[in-house]
Each structure stands twice: as structure tokens, then as C-alpha cells.
Image: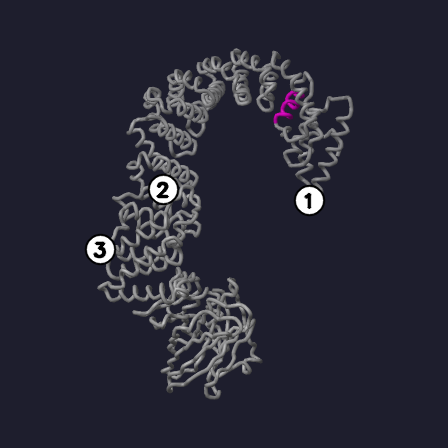
Amino acid sequence: MSPSVPLQEMIRAIRSAKTQCEERGVIQRECAAIRAQFRQSDNGGRSHNLAKLLYVHMLGYPAHFGQVRGFVRTTAIKSKYSSRLWPSLWAIQTQDVPAWSCLSFSIVCVCPSDLFHSNQYIQSLALCTLACMGSAEMCRDLAPEIERLLRASNSYVKKKAALCAVHIVRKVPDLGELFASAARSLLTEKNHGVLHGAVVLITQLCGQSPEALKRFRKAVPDLIQIMKSLIVSGYSPEHDVSGVSDPFLQVRILRLLRILGHNHEAASDTMNDLLAQVATNTDSTKTVGNAVLYETVLTILDIKSESGLRVLAVNILGRFLLNNDRNIRYIAMTSLQKIVGTDHNAVQRHRGTIVDCLKDQDASVKRRALDLSLALVSASNVRSMMKELLVFLSSCPPDLRSQTASGIFNAAESGGWDSISQRRQSLVQVACWCIGEYGDLLTGPCQEMDPAQVSENDVLDALETVLQSHMSSPATRGFALTATMKLSTRITDNVDRIRSVVSIYGSCIDVELQQRAVEYNALFKKYDHMRAAVLERMPVIEKTSGQSNGVPSGDSVKDNQPVKVMPGESLLPQPPADQVCDLLDLLGDSGENQQASLVGAVPAAALVSSTATTAGGDLLDLLGGLEPPPTTPVPVYEKDGVTLTISCDKQSDSDLTVTLTASNSTESDISSFMLQAAVPKSVQLHMKAPSGDLLPARGAAKVSQMVILNNPNKVTLKMRVRISYNRNGSPHTPLLRRQTVDDRAASRLLLGVFFHAAIV
């Protein structure tokens, strides 16, 4: 390619390239030719080459080698245009300091002479260059010349000078007073470009200086007159945009009025009529008109406007909510969110439209609609809003569920729904259960910006309020008492208080409540070492294919379904979900789902039978085709010094007594030793209290536990056991490797037990 080809030819050659490699080759050859021309003394084609480099830079290719040569000292207007446009568009600040210093020096030398040039276009080029890249030193030196050009007779130059003055004020705020008088005089101009530049300059001055703000409040009538002339003027092709006269100038004036009228009643009263006229006469069917209306609404809401005018502004935002453009709906809800606290009734009129936005597919619109819906909840509409929010909670995205649930709770609390009454017993019971399971989290660290401070005493006070209220039903008191007992393992400083509360209800007239209190007192006294395990937190329910929204359906009940506790029974400690599966999955053969009961060690005073449904696969055949049960102890597990033996005693055709005995042959004591067992659901399992939970060193004593199995249906008897213990203060997890099909027969005992150890 010849270096002298026009810019259009180079663009055509680049666009005709079929591959990126071919495009790079075209650009590299052209850049090489431009570098060669830069090294020549003849600068006649430099502006031509700068235009090419600008295009190359726009495509993302390196063109930094031309940055220093970009500013050309020439008298030709065409060359000046290219050389001034070059540093204005180039991100020269990111380049190396020497190159920037060299180019900056050239600008300082050339720009002042161009500012005094007789040609308005050369003057405007110098002003644009200074406005884009003038340093603080350059601004200080050239500020008097810019102020002089603001008073020139040429409107084209005054427009450029006003925008240059804005840059100078931003760079050097101290120079703002220099331009204040000239900026005020520019408001009398008829040229829209000059007016636009003047409004931008005044806005910048008012934002930086309280004195300038006070001074320019006197110009509010002039701004109102300019705005009225734009509204009532006829069609002007030069400034019309979709039927709106110069919307850019209107938006700028409205923003300036918002600044001048903020917290100033006199200025606000002066502009009330104008804002009402703009709000009612602007076409809202076009995006341009919506832009003007939106700025009008923001101005009305930010100044001390009349109440009727504020209602009009809210109604405009309500119309925005019906717009098909999601961006307009989003900014409408954002604005309504800011004013719902001060104009609640006006926003309340659009509640139905806001709630409908919860169904929007756009995530941002849906989040804004949720924030605004929660803010609109009041005592008069709490019931209807709760219905809408609960429907939304059932189908909302996962990232909004926490916010929705918290909002519903706060709304219920503020509406008095947490008070104890006959109609709200179920809600109080759910609250008590949640406090019992997760009450310790109320007093811990919170991720919210301004969390409420909750102490352990506050949590216990809430539960005691439920226990002592005459409105609480016996079932609700039972929930509250159980929650109080659970907190004894979750908090640290108020265990004695919990013990005293529980002991009081040991003589309660209600039999169910009395039984619970007696059992809990036994846990505090005789079985205190087991209290933490018995009252451990419920495992997390995992959603499976047979569930809809976390609710089991039909026979497709999978792993980790909550334990069902029969009347008069206690809930036993349960292992995590994965350990439950390991405990019950006894090397399945047929793949059929089996149901099993899972229990742990319990006090003698509380004979427990609890059931848990799980998918365990085909359980290990323990009795089929084998000899009678062993009456002498048979070792079934021996590892790390822990030995476990099993012996059976058949009481009748359906009853079998199993005795598990553990010993410790190591040099250190073992504490918190516990056994858990699982059998098919059709078999009833009763685990009696163990002889203890401490295994002394060197086999000094043993721990035994009796398990009674009742098999009325004469089904194939299967059983699995899990052990757990602490050694030297640390939990140990001795794990017996799963048997394969080949060695399964060798591992079968008459009551073949597959042991699995887990962390307590």
C-alpha cells in the first residue's frame, strides 16, 4: 500500500481484510510508512497521517509513536484541526511522562497565540484543546484570556469559552469567582449553545461554592423565563427533538433549578408554577419527553414544593411504571423508593402496579419492586400485602429469598402479628422452634449494616413470655419449653437460668408439659454428659426429585426426611445427613428402598422409639439361613485399642435381646462413648441406657448397652450400629472399610453388624 493513499482507501483496505492477520498486516505496513514520513523534514502530509493514526487508535492498535508529533505548528486550518483534535482525543495521560511533558510544552507555546487568532474556528480549536487536556498550571495562566472570550461578541466562541471555563473551574476551584460575573451575563443570550454552556458553568460554580449558590439564586427568574420560552415556542427545526424544543437545554435548566431551590423556600415558590406547567404540557409518549419529565419530577421532589405538586410528581412516576421500557420502570421505582417515607400515601395509590412488577422477568426490576413493596406495608394493608409477598416468596429467585423472608418477618412484627393470641398460635410455635434451633445465631455476628443488638437474656425473656402467657395453648408452651431446653447447649452464660425454668414445670398441672420437664431435669442431673448429643441441632433437609418445594410427595420419600416422633416420645440425636446414609445403607443388593429406625443412647427414664424414613438400599441379611444367635460374646470390631463385642438372647419368637459391650486397651481414657443403631421400620427397637460413657485405660472397666428388638412380622432381621467417642479431648473417627460382595458372607454374624464411626 502506498503511504500517500487517502484515509478512505486505508479504511476500505482494512475492512476488506478477510482475517485478523491480514488486517494487522495492512495496519503495520501503513504505520511503518507513517513513521518514515514523520522522520522527514517535510510536514505537509502530517495532518493526513494523524487522521490515519486516529483511526488506527480507535481500532485498538498501538499508535503511541505519533503522540509527540501530533501537535503541529501550522497556519493551515485543516492541519490545525487535525493537530488540535489529536491531543484532545488521545488518552495522553496514560503514556510516559517525557512524551506528555514535551507535548504539554508545545500546547503551552501554541494555544495562547491561537486564542488571539482572528479566525473563530482556530480560536475554538484552541479552546477545545485546553478544555480536554489543560493542566492546572495552564488553566491558571490562561484563565484571564478565557474570561475575556466569555464577553466576546461571537456566540460560537462564547459557547466554546464557557465549556473551557467549566474545565478550568474543575481543575482550579479557586478561579470560580473569576467567571461568576461573565456566567451571569451569558443568561441573556439568545443562542441556545451559549445558554447551554452558561447553565453548565453556573451549575459547576454552585456545586463548589456556597457563596456562588447564594449569588445565583437571584438568577432563578431568568432561568424560569428561558424555560417558559422553550415550552411555549413554536416548532424550530434547529432545536426540535421528537416534538420537544431543545430537551438538552431543558434538562440542564431543571437540574440547575433543583440545586438553587434545595432547602430554599423563596426560590422553590418562584419555580412551582413553571414545574407544574412542564409536568402537564410535556409529551410522555416519547423517550425525549420522559427525560424532561423525569428531571422535572426530581426537581419537584428535591425542593420545597407544594403538596399538590408532589402528588403530581408521584403520579408521573406511576405512569412510568406502566411503560414497556424496563429502564423507565426501574428509575421510576428507584425514585419512589426515595420518597416513600415522606409521601407514603401518594405512593400507596400505585401499590397494585408496584406489586405487579414483582412478576417482571428482569432481575433488577424485580429487586426494586420488592424493596418498594416492603416499604409500602402498613397496618391497613398488611394482610393483603402479606398474601402477595408470600406468593412471591414461593417462586422468587434464590438470591431474593432471604430478603423477602426478612421483609415479611419485619412487616409481621411491626403489624403486631407476633403477639400471642388464639389465631396466631401456629406462628408462635414456629417462632419458638426457630429460636430453639438457631437462637445462638441471634447473639452472634451479623452481616447487616446496622444489626439489632440481642443478648442471651433477651432470647430467654421472649421464651418465658410465651411460657407465662395465659393466651398460650399447652402445645405452644411445650414448644417454648423445648426451645428453652435446647438453648442450654447453644448458649453459655445462662444455663443455670434455664435449669431453674425447666425445674418449675416439673410440677405443672399439664401432664404433657410435666413429663417433658421431668425428662429435661433428668438430662440436667443424671445424664448431663449426654445432654449435648440429645439436644443437638436438627440436620438440614435436602431437596430431592420426589419433592416439590421441599415437601415430600407420595411414596417418593428420599434421604434425610425429618424424624417422626410419636406422642410421649423424645427426639434422639441424629447424625449428619451423609452419616445417616452411611449408617443405613448396608451394601444394598436389590436397590429397593427400605425404611429404618434410627435411635441413639437415651436415659433409662425415657424409653425411646423414634422412626426415620430413608433410602438405604437392600439391607444386610442377618438371619437368613444362618445358625441360632450366639449366646456368648463375639468380637465384631477391634481397632485402635477399642473392642466391641455382641451377644444375643432370644426371649421369644418375636423378641430378641442384644447386648453390646465395649472395652479400651489403650493407655489413655476414652470419653463420650456412644452407640447408635438402625433397623428396618417394621422392627421395633428399644435402646436402654448404657452403663456409662467412659472407657478407662487398660481395660479397667467396660461399657455395655442392651438393645431390645421386637419383630412381630417375622421379617428378615437386619441391623447397623455406629460408634463415636473422644480420646484425649479430640474426636476420633475409626472407620471400618465397607465389605465387598466377595467377603460379605465371611463377615456375617447371626446379628451381622456393620460398624461405622462418626465424629460426635
Please indicate whether residue 570 sits to the left or right of residue 616 in the image.
left
Secondary structure under the numbered disc 3 in the rendered image: loop
Label 1 crowding class (10 Å Cα cut-off): few <14, some 14-19, many 20+? Answer: few
Q: Quadrant of residue 502?
A: bottom left
Q: Is residue 457 left or right of residue 743?
A: left
The residue labelled by disc 1 is 19
| Whole-percent x, y for residue 281 in the image | 35, 27
Q: Amino acid at mark 1?
A: Thr
In the picture, the quarter occupied by the N terminus is top right
| Mark with earlier residue (2, 3) | 2
Which label number is shown at residue 573? Answer: none
Is residue 80 highlighted in magenta? yes
Q: Amino acid at mark 3?
A: Met
Per the rendered image, the range of residues in magenta is 78-88
Mark 1 vs 2: CB contact within 8 A: no
**Mark 1 or mark 2, which is nearer to you?**
2
Q: CA distance from mark 1 to mark 3?
A: 81 Å
1 or 2: tag closer to the N-terminus: 1
Position of residue 721 measured from the top left corner of the image (x, y, whole percent): 47, 74
In the rendered structure, does residue 325 fall within the stretch colored magenta? no
Q: Residue at x 68, y 19 (%)?
A: 106
Query: Residue 5 at what x, y percent from top left?
Result: 72, 30
Type of amino acid under label 2: Leu
Residue 471 is tagged as 3
